[in-house]
Structures are given as structure tokens and as C-alpha cells.
Image: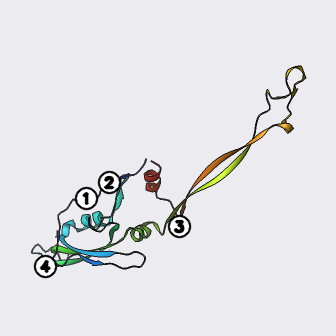
Amino acid sequence: MPYTLVPHRFSVPFEELDGSPEELVTRTWGGTSATRRVKCLVRDRVTLVNELLGYTANWTIHPPAPYGPDILGILASSVSIKPFGKLSQNQSDDKYANYDYCIIDISFEAMEKVLSGIYGYITITETLRDASEFVTLPTKNLFWGTGGGAVAITPFDAPGKINAVGEWIYEISGASAVPSVIFHSTFG
């Protein structure tokens, strides 16, 4: 069964806080990175983190969250969760601190770095290479000469021809297992 890639969306409410986002632009590999700071209910944090970092469930790929429409190609790569506000008035008997809200710091990195962290460093190359193929023609119903003096051609005398062909080479390197999403999105 092929995987289905769905557009990114959030199912739980959250709000971005003042002073967010922060951006860092460099000329090194990986280029732009950014951090967003959001506040959400503690009970929604696990769902929000899954939706930020991406996950696969029931043959459906939910991709990592994009940074935003103004800077393309950077995706959510990690999160840090901290409590926010005062301890909840609804304390339980389990001796753990309970808060109503939490702060989630979301780190965004270049798509190549995020995907290499998920799948290992993957390189995909495509090459179109000229090639040729020598073909020996079948000798059935082939003769030397015409009319009554025609002599059947033996397999040793069979004519041949050269067919020009091209080879398309699609190479995936650095993956211990090729994610099936690559095949389904590339080869239809």
C-alpha cells in the first residue's frame, strides 16, 4: 500500500508569544535557521509536538511544520517544552507539578538537515548516459542471392546492427533503507 503525503495542518490551538520568531541566516551548509516560541495547554502539548515535528500513521505521512511563507525550505526539527505560569489549582495526588500551560520553543532548520536527521544523510543523483547495443538479426528467411541460386544464411553469417540507446540512472546513496515515499512521489 503506498503512503499518502498530506498537507501540513494543526489540530490544537496555540498562540505565538512576543519576541518570536528569531532568525539566523548564515552562508554555511544548512543556511537559515529560526526559532518560534508558542504557548499551548499542557494537555495539548504531545499532539502539537507531533504535528510540529511530523509523523507517519496509517500509511499517511504528516510532514514537519514549515517555518512560514516568507522563508521557504526550513522545517521544524526540534522542540523544547517548559512550564508556564503558576502551578495548576487542580493538583493531583501523584506528587508531580501540574501546570495549565506550557511554552514550546520550536527550532527550524534547512530541509536537507531535517531530512538527513530523519533518514540519515541521503544523496540522490540522476544521470543520463548514452549507450549502444549490438543485435544479431535472426537468419530465418534470409538468403544470399535471389531466385534459384539463393543460399540460406547460416547463423555465423547473420547480419547485425547497432541500436543507440540511453540509460537513465537514478541513484540513492547513504540510506540504510530507502523510504517508500521517495518512490511514490518520484515514480508516481
Q: Position of residue 9 (x, y in %)?
A: 25, 58
Q: Position of residue 91 (x, y in %)?
A: 13, 74
Q: What residue sits right under mark 3 in the picture?
A: 174
Above or below — where is 102 with respect to 134?
A: below
Q: What residue sits right under mark 4 in the picture?
A: 85
Amino acid carrying mark 2 in the image? Val
Report crowding for label 2: few under 14, some 14 to 19, many 20 or more residues within 10 A (C-alpha): few
Q: What residue sits right under mark 1 in the picture?
A: 9
User: In the rendered image, which quarter is residue 51 located in?
Assistant: bottom left
Residue depth check, mark 2 versus mark 4: number of the one nearer the observer: 2
Amino acid carrying mark 1 in the image? Arg
Dot 2 falls on a residue whose secondary structure is: loop
Figure disc tally: 4
Q: Residue furthest right?
A: 149
- On the question of residue 95 being in view, the answer is no
Q: What residue sits right under mark 2 in the picture?
A: 6
